Image (cartoon, coloured by chain):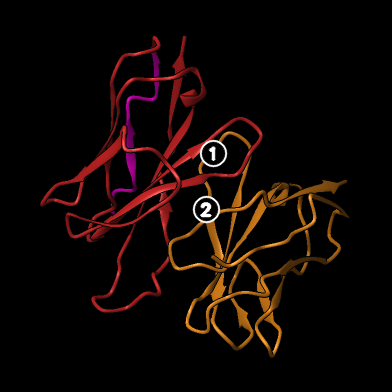
Amino acid sequence: ETGVTQSPTHLIKTRGQQVTLRCSSQSGHNTVSWYQQALGQGPQFIFQYYREEENGRGNFPPRFSGLQFPNYSSELNVNALELDDSALYLCASSLAMSGSGNYNEQFFGPGTRLTVL
Amino acid sequence: DAKTTQPNSMESNEEEPVHLPCNHSTISGTDYIHWYRQLPSQGPEYVIHGLTSNVNNRMASLAIAEDRKSSTLILHRATLRDAAVYYCIPTWDMRFGAGTRLTVKP
Protein backbone atom coordinates (compact mmCIF):
# COMPACT_ATOMS: atom_id res chain seq x y z
CA GLU A 1 0.00 0.00 0.00
CA THR A 2 1.52 3.30 -1.12
CA GLY A 3 1.25 6.21 1.27
CA VAL A 4 0.51 9.84 0.47
CA THR A 5 3.18 11.45 -1.65
CA GLN A 6 3.73 15.10 -2.48
CA SER A 7 5.82 16.89 -5.04
CA PRO A 8 8.00 18.78 -5.17
CA THR A 9 9.69 18.51 -1.78
CA HIS A 10 10.96 22.07 -1.86
CA LEU A 11 10.18 25.04 -4.06
CA ILE A 12 11.37 28.61 -4.28
CA LYS A 13 9.28 31.25 -6.04
CA THR A 14 9.18 35.03 -6.20
CA ARG A 15 6.32 37.34 -5.34
CA GLY A 16 3.60 37.50 -7.97
CA GLN A 17 4.38 34.11 -9.45
CA GLN A 18 2.04 31.14 -9.56
CA VAL A 19 2.73 27.69 -8.13
CA THR A 20 1.20 24.23 -8.44
CA LEU A 21 1.72 21.59 -5.78
CA ARG A 22 0.79 17.96 -6.30
CA CYS A 23 -0.45 15.19 -4.09
CA SER A 24 -1.04 11.50 -4.70
CA SER A 25 -3.58 10.03 -2.32
CA GLN A 26 -3.21 6.73 -0.55
CA SER A 27 -4.66 3.89 -2.57
CA GLY A 28 -8.44 3.60 -2.18
CA HIS A 29 -8.94 7.04 -0.63
CA ASN A 30 -11.53 9.40 -2.12
CA THR A 31 -10.99 12.54 -0.07
CA VAL A 32 -8.06 14.92 0.00
CA SER A 33 -7.46 17.92 2.20
CA TRP A 34 -4.84 20.63 1.93
CA TYR A 35 -3.25 22.52 4.81
CA GLN A 36 -0.83 25.38 5.18
CA GLN A 37 1.58 25.25 8.10
CA ALA A 38 3.63 28.33 8.89
CA LEU A 39 6.74 27.88 10.97
CA GLY A 40 5.91 27.19 14.60
CA GLN A 41 2.16 27.01 14.03
CA GLY A 42 -0.42 24.27 13.58
CA PRO A 43 -1.69 23.31 10.13
CA GLN A 44 -4.39 25.63 8.80
CA PHE A 45 -7.15 24.03 6.74
CA ILE A 46 -7.27 25.35 3.17
CA PHE A 47 -9.91 23.13 1.56
CA GLN A 48 -11.08 19.59 1.09
CA TYR A 49 -12.12 17.66 -2.01
CA TYR A 50 -14.45 14.69 -2.01
CA ARG A 51 -14.92 12.81 -5.26
CA GLU A 52 -13.62 15.73 -7.32
CA GLU A 53 -15.86 18.35 -5.70
CA GLU A 54 -14.79 20.97 -3.16
CA ASN A 55 -16.30 19.89 0.14
CA GLY A 56 -15.30 22.62 2.55
CA ARG A 57 -12.99 25.60 2.61
CA GLY A 58 -11.05 27.43 5.26
CA ASN A 59 -10.32 31.13 5.50
CA PHE A 60 -8.13 31.43 2.44
CA PRO A 61 -8.56 33.83 -0.51
CA PRO A 62 -9.70 32.68 -3.96
CA ARG A 63 -6.15 32.78 -5.29
CA PHE A 64 -5.81 29.44 -3.49
CA SER A 65 -7.56 26.90 -5.68
CA GLY A 66 -7.51 23.18 -6.12
CA LEU A 67 -8.42 20.22 -8.23
CA GLN A 68 -9.06 16.58 -7.55
CA PHE A 69 -8.72 14.16 -10.45
CA PRO A 70 -10.66 10.95 -11.19
CA ASN A 71 -7.81 8.91 -9.69
CA TYR A 72 -8.22 11.08 -6.56
CA SER A 73 -4.83 12.72 -6.87
CA SER A 74 -4.93 16.45 -6.29
CA GLU A 75 -3.34 19.80 -7.05
CA LEU A 76 -3.12 22.98 -5.03
CA ASN A 77 -2.66 26.14 -7.08
CA VAL A 78 -1.67 29.47 -5.62
CA ASN A 79 -1.72 32.58 -7.81
CA ALA A 80 -0.08 35.94 -7.21
CA LEU A 81 2.25 34.60 -4.53
CA GLU A 82 2.88 36.74 -1.47
CA LEU A 83 5.74 36.55 1.03
CA ASP A 84 3.31 35.25 3.69
CA ASP A 85 2.56 32.24 1.52
CA SER A 86 5.93 30.83 2.54
CA ALA A 87 5.04 27.70 4.50
CA LEU A 88 4.88 23.93 4.54
CA TYR A 89 1.92 22.72 2.48
CA LEU A 90 0.49 19.42 3.63
CA CYS A 91 -1.83 17.11 1.81
CA ALA A 92 -3.88 14.47 3.59
CA SER A 93 -6.09 11.73 2.18
CA SER A 94 -8.84 9.67 3.73
CA LEU A 95 -11.72 7.40 2.86
CA ALA A 96 -15.00 9.19 3.47
CA MET A 97 -18.30 7.39 3.49
CA SER A 98 -21.06 8.83 1.33
CA GLY A 99 -23.61 10.86 3.27
CA SER A 100 -21.54 11.03 6.43
CA GLY A 101 -19.99 14.13 7.96
CA ASN A 102 -17.69 12.10 10.13
CA TYR A 103 -14.53 11.23 8.30
CA ASN A 104 -12.08 8.48 8.93
CA GLU A 105 -8.39 8.69 9.71
CA GLN A 106 -6.40 11.09 7.57
CA PHE A 107 -3.01 10.13 6.26
CA PHE A 108 -0.64 13.00 5.71
CA GLY A 109 2.11 13.39 3.19
CA PRO A 110 5.52 14.79 4.09
CA GLY A 111 4.64 18.22 2.70
CA THR A 112 6.06 20.69 0.22
CA ARG A 113 8.17 23.50 1.63
CA LEU A 114 7.38 26.67 -0.34
CA THR A 115 9.59 29.72 -0.01
CA VAL A 116 8.46 32.99 -1.57
CA LEU A 117 11.17 35.61 -2.05
CA ASP B 1 -16.95 26.27 14.47
CA ALA B 2 -15.96 24.32 17.55
CA LYS B 3 -13.50 26.25 19.69
CA THR B 4 -10.64 24.16 21.06
CA THR B 5 -8.44 24.92 24.06
CA GLN B 6 -5.26 22.99 24.82
CA PRO B 7 -2.25 23.81 27.02
CA ASN B 8 0.59 25.27 24.99
CA SER B 9 3.10 22.84 26.44
CA MET B 10 3.49 19.95 28.88
CA GLU B 11 6.39 17.97 30.24
CA SER B 12 6.60 14.36 31.26
CA ASN B 13 9.21 11.94 32.48
CA GLU B 14 10.01 8.91 30.41
CA GLU B 15 7.91 5.82 31.22
CA GLU B 16 5.36 7.83 33.17
CA PRO B 17 1.74 8.35 32.07
CA VAL B 18 0.78 11.58 30.38
CA HIS B 19 -2.68 13.13 30.33
CA LEU B 20 -3.20 15.72 27.62
CA PRO B 21 -6.41 17.72 28.11
CA CYS B 22 -8.59 19.41 25.53
CA ASN B 23 -11.67 21.57 25.95
CA HIS B 24 -14.13 21.71 23.05
CA SER B 25 -17.23 23.17 24.61
CA THR B 26 -18.98 24.02 21.31
CA ILE B 27 -18.51 20.67 19.63
CA SER B 28 -21.30 19.50 17.35
CA GLY B 29 -23.26 16.53 18.59
CA THR B 30 -22.28 14.38 15.63
CA ASP B 31 -18.60 15.25 15.23
CA TYR B 32 -15.85 12.89 16.23
CA ILE B 33 -12.99 14.05 18.42
CA HIS B 34 -9.73 13.36 16.63
CA TRP B 35 -6.21 13.47 18.05
CA TYR B 36 -3.20 13.79 15.84
CA ARG B 37 0.43 14.38 16.64
CA GLN B 38 3.27 15.88 14.69
CA LEU B 39 6.81 14.78 15.29
CA PRO B 40 9.60 17.18 14.36
CA SER B 41 10.03 17.62 10.60
CA GLN B 42 7.14 15.29 9.76
CA GLY B 43 3.53 15.59 8.71
CA PRO B 44 0.86 14.97 11.35
CA GLU B 45 -0.05 11.39 12.14
CA TYR B 46 -3.25 9.92 13.48
CA VAL B 47 -3.34 8.92 17.13
CA ILE B 48 -6.94 8.13 18.01
CA HIS B 49 -10.52 9.29 17.63
CA GLY B 50 -13.84 8.78 19.40
CA LEU B 51 -17.41 9.96 19.59
CA THR B 52 -18.88 9.33 23.02
CA SER B 53 -17.28 6.29 24.58
CA ASN B 54 -13.71 5.98 25.76
CA VAL B 55 -11.42 4.45 23.17
CA ASN B 56 -8.20 2.49 23.35
CA ASN B 57 -5.66 1.57 20.72
CA ARG B 58 -2.04 0.52 20.64
CA MET B 59 -0.82 4.11 20.85
CA ALA B 60 -3.08 5.72 23.43
CA SER B 61 -6.41 5.95 25.19
CA LEU B 62 -9.02 8.65 24.76
CA ALA B 63 -11.29 9.59 27.62
CA ILE B 64 -14.33 11.63 26.60
CA ALA B 65 -16.40 13.57 29.10
CA GLU B 66 -20.05 12.60 29.35
CA ASP B 67 -21.14 16.00 28.01
CA ARG B 68 -18.50 15.76 25.25
CA LYS B 69 -17.20 19.23 26.06
CA SER B 70 -13.75 17.94 26.90
CA SER B 71 -11.52 14.99 26.30
CA THR B 72 -8.16 13.69 27.50
CA LEU B 73 -5.54 11.83 25.53
CA ILE B 74 -3.68 9.37 27.70
CA LEU B 75 -0.24 8.03 26.86
CA HIS B 76 0.23 5.22 29.34
CA ARG B 77 4.04 5.17 29.33
CA ALA B 78 5.68 8.10 27.61
CA THR B 79 8.80 7.42 25.60
CA LEU B 80 11.27 9.86 24.09
CA ARG B 81 9.69 9.13 20.70
CA ASP B 82 6.39 10.53 21.97
CA ALA B 83 7.85 14.04 22.07
CA ALA B 84 5.67 15.90 19.59
CA VAL B 85 2.93 18.49 19.20
CA TYR B 86 -0.45 16.91 19.98
CA TYR B 87 -3.55 18.30 18.31
CA CYS B 88 -7.13 17.82 19.46
CA ILE B 89 -9.56 18.30 16.56
CA PRO B 90 -13.31 18.27 17.27
CA THR B 91 -14.49 19.09 13.76
CA TRP B 92 -15.40 17.00 10.76
CA ASP B 93 -13.19 19.06 8.48
CA MET B 94 -10.07 18.60 10.58
CA ARG B 95 -9.31 22.18 11.61
CA PHE B 96 -6.15 22.11 13.67
CA GLY B 97 -5.47 24.47 16.55
CA ALA B 98 -2.11 25.31 18.05
CA GLY B 99 -1.81 21.99 19.90
CA THR B 100 0.19 21.00 22.96
CA ARG B 101 3.93 20.56 22.68
CA LEU B 102 4.87 17.53 24.77
CA THR B 103 8.43 17.28 26.05
CA VAL B 104 9.55 13.92 27.45
CA LYS B 105 12.51 13.94 29.79
CA PRO B 106 14.76 10.90 30.18
Q: Colour of chain B?
A: orange
Q: Which region is colored magenta? A: A1-12
Seen from the viewer's position, the closer of residues A70 and B42 is A70
Magenta-colored stretch includes residue A59: no
Tell me which chain appears red: A
Magenta-colored stretch includes residue A5: yes
Q: Position of residue A4 (x, y in %)?
A: 34, 46
Say which residue appears at 83% left-offset and 66% top-offset.
Answer: B17
Q: Secondary structure at mark 2?
A: strand
Say which residue appears at 62% left-offset and 53% top-offset.
Answer: B97
Q: Position of residue A11 (x, y in %)?
A: 38, 17
Which corner quadrant of the image does residue B90 belong to?
Answer: bottom right
Q: Which residue is mark 2?
A: B45
Q: Is residue B66 above or below residue A80?
A: below
Q: Which residue is mark 1?
A: B42
Q: Secondary structure at mark 1?
A: loop
Asked if marks 2 and 1 touch (Cβ < 8 Å), the reply is yes
Q: Residue furthest front?
A: A61
Q: Is residue A18 above or below residue B94?
A: above
* Chain hosting mark 2: B
Seen from the viewer's position, the closer of residues A24 and A58 is A58
Q: CA distance from mark 2 to mark 1?
A: 9 Å
